[in-house]
Image (cartoon, helix red, strand yellow):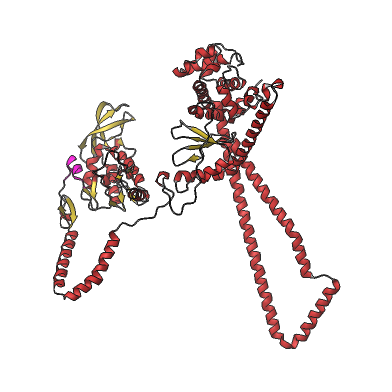
């Protein structure tokens, strides 16, 4: 178990009188159960503090859960410690007075030059090196050691034995690291300096538990554990001091004793009480969103708006719909597929016509890319001797070939319907399922991978350029600030010297030069009046004229820098890699924003429920409902703030488009039935007019 400030920590005992349906709070990683929420919150905040230590690796500054994971990983490594080396290591560790570092060095040095029975290493055999295992250590004269080894094949089965010299055996490196050895020593002992093994380790490997002569005078066994004799003496001395104190107090007068109690003992007890009373530590936000409770300092949160759910496709198909549309829209140039709106694609998926251009062109573009890849699909259509060109008539044949190739039972059942020319009658789940598998195969092609590599490289270059320009801009600002500061300091210094010189001259001349200075001032005034020009006013007018020019120049430069920054960000966004969610709210709902659709989509934790926000008012209300005390909503709000202007402009643009479409539909309805508008004027069926302008010839 993790240590609290290097000391063992006991978990809370579970309540014994819980009722079957009583509401409780449980900590996930300790399984502790609490009735009181404040007690639960106090305990989980303690576990989140970085005051815990991994018992096995001695790593500090960890949270409780991090320490648990560290112990688990270290224990797994310890379990892989070579079994044949364990007795030797334990024998060296038992009652050793070395520090951990010196103990590890001693063990590794011994193992470098002493081979043990059961070790696997390499030996020279017939002018080559083969894997072997030591069976027996043979002693020989002249301080030479020989070993009986068993030669092993690649499956580590014995294929023969031999006697070899020590110099013919090769150990490339020890079969464990120093850190693993340290963890093993900590795990197998209950105290250090001297190191003492747990009884189970000593008994299992027949290690003596009798301390050697040199430490018997300093340590003794108490309750099965080795204890220092200093602690025993200290305990006896404490008892004696307590006895003497009590005997001395008996002889004291009653008044003095009462006074001591009232003054000293009461203060001491109050101090002890303060020490032992648990102090409520302040909560360090952000914390897990589900643990956040309203506080007096909280801002006024707006009510979270309910997302719209008026999708044409079934609600559990929205995820696949978004994925397919996002992919074909983002890689439209590579697919030679002109982009279309999400609304048009959704209407086309739900339409019962079997040869809608938007559906035919999307399937054909994906199938053409698979053919160009010269992969499994290309081989499949070559075997059936298909014509090289996919048309509005033959596209279903290529689609059926694809479904036969992937051999998915739920999609293979659609092949007869497609072959009969009734693709439009398929269920929405089936249509999107086919698209999903097509895109999965397309992403794995070399063409898409190559394009992604290009985008990644270009994004990195643009990001480096943007970062370099930001650094350069910051450097210029710092230099300008330092220059202005230096000029200001120089002006102040000059003014100070001028005043000082004037005061000195006035003091030196005194009244004797009063007439002269007065006469000089009169002459200066006369010259200024005659010329009609005041030098100070002239300089002021000059500065006044220059100021608007400087401000205009500064504004132009600032606007240019901002435009350059926006341009670089747009270029980075064009290099599409994948769409990431904006973040999650306290209930783990994910929020998505797609560049080509002016809505924010809401996905439930289980991905079965979807909704969307489509107006700026909904966005502002949702943004104002997020609580920054929770880790998830804090990150989500920060991401929304970064993209707020861009998202707002797209939402407003979409709102205008929707308003125009509604106005057009109302205009169509108001017209006389004798002068009906043709179907192409109705925005609701705009997807029927789709033309692939990027189609390959």
Q: Is residue 278 above or below residue 651?
A: below
Q: Nearer the viewer, residue 188 or 380?
A: 380
Specify whether residue 267 is painted magenta. no
Q: Report whether residue 20 is seen.
A: yes
Q: Left of 113 or right of it: where is 283?
A: right
Task: Give how far across and how far down residue 168 sits, in percent.
Answer: 30, 35
- Farthest residue, direction bottom: 512
Q: Nearer the viewer, residue 418 or 172?
A: 418
Q: Report whether residue 408 is seen.
A: no
Write down the region rendered in magenta: 197-208
Task: Give how far across and how far down residue 682 sits, in percent.
Answer: 66, 25
Task: Give how far across and how far down residue 573 sits, in percent.
Answer: 59, 38
Q: Nearer the viewer, residue 290 or 596?
A: 290
Choose top left, top right, bottom left or bottom right for residue 453: top right
Task: Give how far across and how far down residue 155 sits, in percent.
Answer: 31, 26
Q: Quadrant of the C terminus?
A: top right
Residue at point 64%, 27% (across, down): 683
Q: Nearer the viewer, residue 336 or 100?
A: 336
Q: Is residue 443 above or below residue 633?
A: above
């Amino acid at each position: 178990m993790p240590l609290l400030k290097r000391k063992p920590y006991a978990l809370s005992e579970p309540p014994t009188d819980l009722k079957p349906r009583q509401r409780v709070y449980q900590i996930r990683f300790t399984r502790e159960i609490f009735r009181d929420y404040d007690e639960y919150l106090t305990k989980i905040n303690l576990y989140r503090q970085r005051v815990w230590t991994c018992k096995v690796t001695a790593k500090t500054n960890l949270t409780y859960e991090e320490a648990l994971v560290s112990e688990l990983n270290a224990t797994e490594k310890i379990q892989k410690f070579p079994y044949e080396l364990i007795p030797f290591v334990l024998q060296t560790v038992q009652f050793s007075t070395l520090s951990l570092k010196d103990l590890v060095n001693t063990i590794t040095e011994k193992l470098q030059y002493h081979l043990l029975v059961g070790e696997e290493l390499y030996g020279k055999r017939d002018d080559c090196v083969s894997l072997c295992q030591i069976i027996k250590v043979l002693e020989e004269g002249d301080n030479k050691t020989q070993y009986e080894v068993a030669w092993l094949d690649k499956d580590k089965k014995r294929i023969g034995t031999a006697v070899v010299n020590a110099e013919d055996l090769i150990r490339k490196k020890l079969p464990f690291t120093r850190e693993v050895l340290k963890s093993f020593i900590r795990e197998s002992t209950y105290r250090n300096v001297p190191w003492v093994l747990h009884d189970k380790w000593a008994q299992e490997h027949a290690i003596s538990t009798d301390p050697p002569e040199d430490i018997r005078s300093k340590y003794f066994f108490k309750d099965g554990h080795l204890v220092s004799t200093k602690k025993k003496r200290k305990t006896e001395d404490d008892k004696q001091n307590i006895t003497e104190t009590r005997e001395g107090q008996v002889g004291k007068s009653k008044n003095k004793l009462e006074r001591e109690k009232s003054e000293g003992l009461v203060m001491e007890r109050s101090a002890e009480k303060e020490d032992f009373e648990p102090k409520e530590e302040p909560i360090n936000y952000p914390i897990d969103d589900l643990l956040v409770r309203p506080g007096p300092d909280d801002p006024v949160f707006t009510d979270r708006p309910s997302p719209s759910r008026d999708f044409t496709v079934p609600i559990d198909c929205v995820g696949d719909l978004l994925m397919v549309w996002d992919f074909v829209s983002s890689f439209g140039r590579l697919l030679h597929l002109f982009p279309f709106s999400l609304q048009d694609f959704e209407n086309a998926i739900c339409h019962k016509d079997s040869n809608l251009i938007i559906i035919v062109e999307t399937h054909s573009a994906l199938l053409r890319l698979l053919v160009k890849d010269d992969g499994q699909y290309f081989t499949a259509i070559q075997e059936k001797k298909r014509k090289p060109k996919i048309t509005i008539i033959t596209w279903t044949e290529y689609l059926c070939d694809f479904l036969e190739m992937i051999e998915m039972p739920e999609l293979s059942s659609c092949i007869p319907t497609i072959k009969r020319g009734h693709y439009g009658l398929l269920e929405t789940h089936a249509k999107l399922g086919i698209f999903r598998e097509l895109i999965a195969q397309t992403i794995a092609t070399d063409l898409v991978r190559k394009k992604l590599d290009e985008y990644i490289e270009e994004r990195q270059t643009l990001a480096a350029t943007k970062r370099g320009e930001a650094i350069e801009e910051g450097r210029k600002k710092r230099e300008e600030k330092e220059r202005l500061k230096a000029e200001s300091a120089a002006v102040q210094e000059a003014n100070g010297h001028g005043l000082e010189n004037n005061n000195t001259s006035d003091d030196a001349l005194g009244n004797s030069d009063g007439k002269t200075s007065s006469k000089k001032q009169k002459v200066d005034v006369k010259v200024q009046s005659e010329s009609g020009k005041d030098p100070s006013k002239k300089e002021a007018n000059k500065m006044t004229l220059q100021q608007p020019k400087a401000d205009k120049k500064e504004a132009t430069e600032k606007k240019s820098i901002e435009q350059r920054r926006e341009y670089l960000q747009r270029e980075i966004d064009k290099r599409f890699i994948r769409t990431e969610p904006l973040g999650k709210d306290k209930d783990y709902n994910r929020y998505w924003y797609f560049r080509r659709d002016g809505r924010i989509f809401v996905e439930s934790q289980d991905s079965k429920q979807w909704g969307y926000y489509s107006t700026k008012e909904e966005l502002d209300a949702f943004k104002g409902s997020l609580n920054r005390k929770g880790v998830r909503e804090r990150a989500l709000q920060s991401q929304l703030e970064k993209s707020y202007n861009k998202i707002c402009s797209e939402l407003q643009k979409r709102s205008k488009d929707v308003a125009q479409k509604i106005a057009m539909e109302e205009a169509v309805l108001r017209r006389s039935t004798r002068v009906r508008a043709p179907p192409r004027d109705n925005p609701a069926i705009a997807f029927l007019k789709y033309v692939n302008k990027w189609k390959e010839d």
